[in-house]
Image: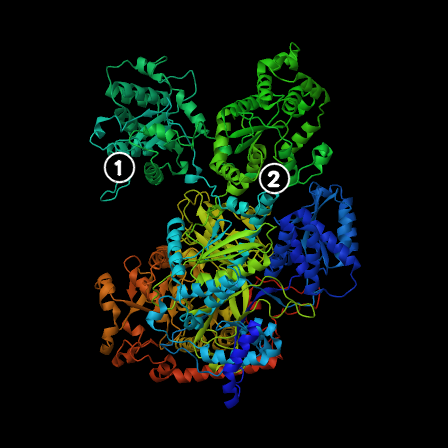
Amino acid sequence: MQLLFLLSLLTALFSPLARTDPAPPPVKLKPVTAALYTRWAQTPLLVEASEFFFDESPTLFWSFLSRVQAHLKARTQGPWTDEQQHDLAVEISQTLLSPVKQNFLGLALALRFYSARVQMYRQIVETENITRVCADVLVDFGDGMHACGLEEVKAAWTLTSDLENPEKIKKPQLISVDHHYPGSRDAKRTVIVYGNILRPEFWAVHELLVAHTDQVRYIFRHYADSRDLVNVSKIRIPGYGVEMAIKSTEYKAQDDSKIKEGDGALDEQTDEVVDEELDTDIEGFDFGKLKSRLPEKKDQLEQLKSFLLLSSGTELQQLKAWQYQDLSLQAAEKSLRVASLHGGSSTDALRTLRDISQNFPTQAPTLLKIPVREDVKAEIERNREFFAHYHSIEAGGAALFVNGIQHDTDVTDIYVLFEKLREENRLMESLHGFGIQGPDMTSILELDLHPTGGAKYGIDIRHPAVHFVNDLEKDKRYAEWPTSVRELVRQSFPPTLLKAIRRNFYNLILVVDPAEMKANHDILQLTESFYVHKLPIRVGLVFITTDSTDSTGLTDPSIAMYNAYRYMQEKKTPQAALSFLTDVYYSKEAKEKGSLTPEIVIDAFKAKFPQETLEEVFGAGSQYEEGRNDGRKFLEKLNINQTPTALLNGVLLDGSRLNADEFENEVLQNLVAVYGSLQRDVMSGSLTDYSDVVEFLMSKPHIVPRLNSLILAPSEYRILDFSGQSLDPERYTFANFEALKSADKVATMASASFYLTKHEEGDAHPVTLWIVADPETAAGRELLYAAVKHSKASNDVRIGIIYNPSESSLAGDLRISKAIQVALETQPMNLARNFITKLLKEENVAEIAVGTKTLQDFEVNGMDMVAFSSGLEQVSTDFLKIHSSFAQHELNLKPGETGAVGNGYVVGPLQKDFGADDIDLLEKYIESYGAVKLSNELHRLHIFPSGEKLSDVVMMTSALLSGLGSTEDAKKRTKVLYSENENSIINIESRNPQQPAFDISFIVDPVSKEAQKIIPVLMVLHEALNCRIRVLMNCRDKLSELPLKSFYRMVLEPRLTFTDNGSISPNFAVARFPALPQTALLTMNLLPPDNWLTEATSAVHDLDNIRLEEVDGWGVYGGFELMNLLLEGSAKDQSNEQPPRGTQFILGTSSNPNIVDTIVMANLGYFQFKANPGSWTIKLREGRSRDIYAIASSDGAEKDGTDEEQLRVVLGSFSTKMMKIYVKKRIGMEKEDVLSDPKAAGVEKIAGTGILDSISNYWSPEEKKALEASGSDDVINIFSLASGHLYERFLRLMMLSVVKNTKTPVKFWFLKNYLSPQFKEFIPFMAARYNFQFELVEYKWPRWLHHQSEKQRVIWGYKILFLDVLFPLSVKKIIFVDADQIVRTDMKELRDLDLEGAPYGYTPFCESRKEMEGFRFWKNGYWASHLGHRRYHISALYVVDLVRFRKIAAGDRLRAQYQGLSQDPNSLSNLDQDLPNNMIYQVPIKSLPQEWLWCETWCDDASKVDAKTIDLCNNPLTKEPKLTAAMRIIPEWKAYDEEVRRLQDEFQADKKRLSGGGQGAEPRLSGAGQGAEPMQPVLEDDSENDVFVHSRPAAHGGEL
């Protein structure tokens, strides 16, 4: 009724207009659309779904396939439609998955998440030397033996089975994501089946192999072709953003060439689709909802919508500066009002936020009319203070938290987020199963269980082995220093870290073998210098001498040094004793000898103490030998066998840095950490002036009796999964246990365990330790005895026992194990504990063994011996079989081995000396990861009635929640804190309160780029998954400019949609801008995830300069392709952890090992490959890289079993991870450097496309042969870039001018990133006509390097920041020429110019045009003082000596300086020229003669006659458009332009004649659906895929 009333009122308002004037026609706006496609063909949705099940568990994968097989047998239809596959996958998921996981499956299919995985399998079969071509199933038997179809497979099976030793057949190469058929892993033979699960031919082979899994290891890989699919086009994918940025029109940069209209990929869309997009919030009216509720009023609603569009307009309005101030608050107010209309929890509020941020330039005027309530403003202000204080988020900043884990909004994309959410869901479902649900789960998930200070453990330094050199609290030399601990927090001027305070805050202990002269002399000398220079560090020494009892100081140098030190410590001072050690090391005799001998030590001692009897000091029985073995006892507590070793306050320092170069820095870095910790202790009041500092430090929780790397730093962290279902007690038998899944076995073991604790009461115990041992052996009993004893001392631990009998024990009567178990089952805990303690003593076991005593003789007062004896008679060995199986299969222990499990964290097998101190360490380690905090919170929530149940839940959840063993900071959980939530927070509840729900908090400024990107993601997540969403406004006030200057669309949808014929809807995953300003100048930017390399492949219009009012036809479409996925990594020399700068790696396949290459930067050792889904090999490149280095190890890749010199990396996801490669120098190459021999680097051949994306060499065959015969590599290399049709027009003319004036062969290098499809299509034609070469180069901006947001600044960055890695080492010099230049000379002259040792040469700015004096910014201010007598250089033309550039690491220096300066938005205004001019003292510039660059803006007319190049610089005085200026300034410009136009017309005519028609609505693969081999490789020679290659104008053919 309200809607009808409102509509009637509005109709009445407009009716007078309607009577006097005709109704305004509906507003038809020209939309902009964009879509992104993969380079590979459609992948079947059922196959993608199967990979989802595989990631859930391999068992589910095979269950899913069996159901597909059953459906296939009953199926009679033809090819599968997308919708049929989707529906079948969903139907099967309802029987195999929980409701939450079903939601994830739907979202995974909408994201096409597993398409990359399926394509990976395609790539493998295409590139791994498989010679057979099969239609539906291919079987690889190894040794190059392949078979197609059932009959061939049977024949091959018979052939291989008849071999004398079939297991000796060379097995096929396996990869990490292979599917192993259950029960076949142990077979000796291996076959790989490549099968199409949509075809019966595969299932016939599958059934044959399943029947023989006892004989063969069956590996399955998908073999998905497209013959059974209705839709064989490329895949349109979501997961990226599209920005329409408003461009400045200060300088006109549009081409005046008439657009030749073509068939755009989405030109067939109807006006109704665009109108539907316009049915959104216009002036507060949601026309979509109005039309659905009032269909009979559709015409009137259209009139109203047209009126509002005309009155409010889609055009940009110029706002006054004062109007900007509250736009952020007004945007928040509008969305909060929408939320309040729906009780504060409507998704409409999110949609309002999305529409405001994504259409902000046109939304801003309507926001001005919205008053902001004072209570809203005040609450936002108070919350801002909380965000800043607790989360370090300033006003206007953004942060995304999912279950308390913060995700970086800048780098997190939907594919990464999907993986994180799925991982988190496994945890949530486990918690839900444990009984932690709803708000209680949120409270638990917000706990920060990470250890404070990184969990670095240390030992107590109060040990007799430590010989302290000084004592700050007692020595007179420190008497004048203040003693108060408050000095730590008192400000000092100048600020200092090591304040002179007379307290032993910093205790540095060196553990040394005094005989190891080379290892010790540097660090001992540096340590001595700490004392000499009076640093507030207390120094101590621990001596490790020979363990021989027969040696003395007269025969062993280590004992001699120890005795001499002890003598001087007692007779002189500890300081003199330390000086004696260093003097001996640096003595002439020791240096000549190269090592220490007893004689050298004794001679040095005699020189100082000639009166002493040497026998008394160094001989047998010397009093100075006392305590010599204490050092070894101290070293045992460190659990290492390495000297020298250093500790600071008991914590080990990095042993790899105990050398002259790094020791001082290592000590300093650790002092900083200690200093900060001490300050916090003083501020909290825990450290006072009355504290004994050393006592205080040694009582901290991280100080333990003994260190154990098996606990603290295992080679692999293993965490048990408690999420399964336990067996019912009545079904607790070995047979039933063996049939369980792994998680069910763990849950069963947890439910069946008995525990020993300190007290009988049912208190909760944060730490549960399972001790794995064989009580029938002395070693097992010793470990159990220590554990039982520990249970009596600790209030926080409970001890359970896992029996792991050895084979010899199983052959005995197992009476001790049975007695322990029966006691636990039949007796009260304290009585059982005391009985077990007696039973574990060796003397008692001995008496039982010889029969002098029975088990009953060890009765403890109060025991129920009847129950015990009865239980002992009835007990079977089933429980021992269960325990033994669990220890071996779940804990990976061999029979009889010992181990420990702390809250699910598996430690073992244990060393023989693992004892009480180690058990104590394990308890503290588990507690450091939040076990106590978790226990307290669960207790507070009152979820569980008993302490036993609470202890069980803490055990099952603490390791999972804490991220134990994870180095990711992302695992840290934070509770999002704010002041109030009444007026400034949007709360949206989950759709299903009964299921686990993600708790998502988003702190955001509603008019920020983060809002544009993340709000649509939240809307999709809320619709697709079960989420509670909270949006917390973090507005900026007093804005001085428009906060958003772009329109934005996030291409993302919660589910797939389909057409009536079952194919995926053409509207799916398309970015639409239906109501953009028609008169504004806009530029389209695709904003994909960081690891995607995309480019425009279909666009009629200039996507860099869009003015919709000038567009003829329907609108503007931009078609893009995902060309590559970035594979990133870092390389280091394992000997010194330094990047092997200039080293080259190649990436390829078994059949083609050199497809792409890369060069390692000095910055972080960073490198990047362009890859695509598949299995790839990585090698060092032939030449100096491989001559000097070998690959040592890697993280993120694995050694390829077929070649020790290469790695294998499997890429099967849209998201990629960083890998690390460690290299080592080959013997004899220790002093060599890859870049040290320019000649060698210069002749190193370039065999692949590399990071360079090499397109082709366009010499004719005859010219190429002539060039090779002459041995000439005299090529002029020209680098340039352009964006937009106008600058591409300029670029073609620049190229023409270069070619016409340069007699030497020319090769152009173009930045591929921003070139239009038309330019890339035309350039091969031009190259063939004018006989030049070209390559398109591409380098993805590294994610660690500060990114620019404006396209122009990004382009400027590419001009200067990556010169060392853009080009192969064979390119010695390269010349950059701006696109808008005309060259009038032979560029060989510039190439050969002597740069006089500088890495590059630039032309200084002209200063001869006097009327421009006021615009010469470099003549005053910063630049005048920085440059001094030097000139400011222009970046329009420069020549780079790449050999010298790389040699001095110029690129690394430029990037480092850029990283620092670019954080300031006011710095580097002209990035491409400000940066080299700023670095002129670190990276010198050779000033080129002025005639090399003439531009009218800065140079007078008289100098034009000498100009070798003319550049069309912008004129800040006249603002003349460049096109106009070009025709006026450069006489030859029009002739060049006409020549190129004629060539373009000729090309278009040829193209039209040969192509025979336009492109369809979807990009398609040639040959798709026409044969058994429709898929083409997607990372092979780009000359076959990207451009048309020809040698004669008439030879057009192939792809265009």
Q: Is 611 situated left or right of 332 in this image? A: left
Quarter of the image with the N terminus in it: bottom right
Quarter of the image with the C terminus in it: bottom right
Q: Is the residue marked by circle 2 packed among few (<14), some (14-19), or many (20+) residues within 10 Å? A: many
In front of the other: 243 or 1330: 243
In front of the other: 1466 or 1249: 1466
How did the renderer colour the structure? Answer: rainbow
In front of the other: 947 or 183: 947
Secondary structure found at label 2: loop
| Mark 2 touches mark 1? (CB < 8 Å) | no
Q: Residue 1533 at what x, y percent from top left?
A: 39, 82
Q: Residue 1373 at what x, y percent from top left?
A: 39, 64
Q: Residue most toward the bottom?
A: 20
Residue 487, numbered label: 1
Residue 149 quadrant: bottom right
Q: Is the residue marked by circle 1 packed among few (<14), some (14-19), or many (20+) residues within 10 Å? A: some
Q: Is 1562 situated left or right of 1543 in this image? A: right
Amino acid beneath label 1? Glu
In this rendering, the answer to whether 1273 lies above or below 423 is: below
In this rendering, the answer to whether 188 lies above or below 1486 is: above
In this rendering, the answer to whether 158 lies above or below 1249 is: above
Q: Please report the residue visible at 50 percent of the width from the left and 35 percent of the height from the top.
A: 926
Secondary structure found at label 1: helix
Q: Residue 1538 at what x, y percent from top left?
A: 44, 84
Query: Circle 2 sits on which residue?
Result: 722
Amino acid beneath label 2? Phe
Instruction: Give the distance between the C-alpha atoms of the residues marked 2 and 1, in whole angstroms.
Output: 50 Å
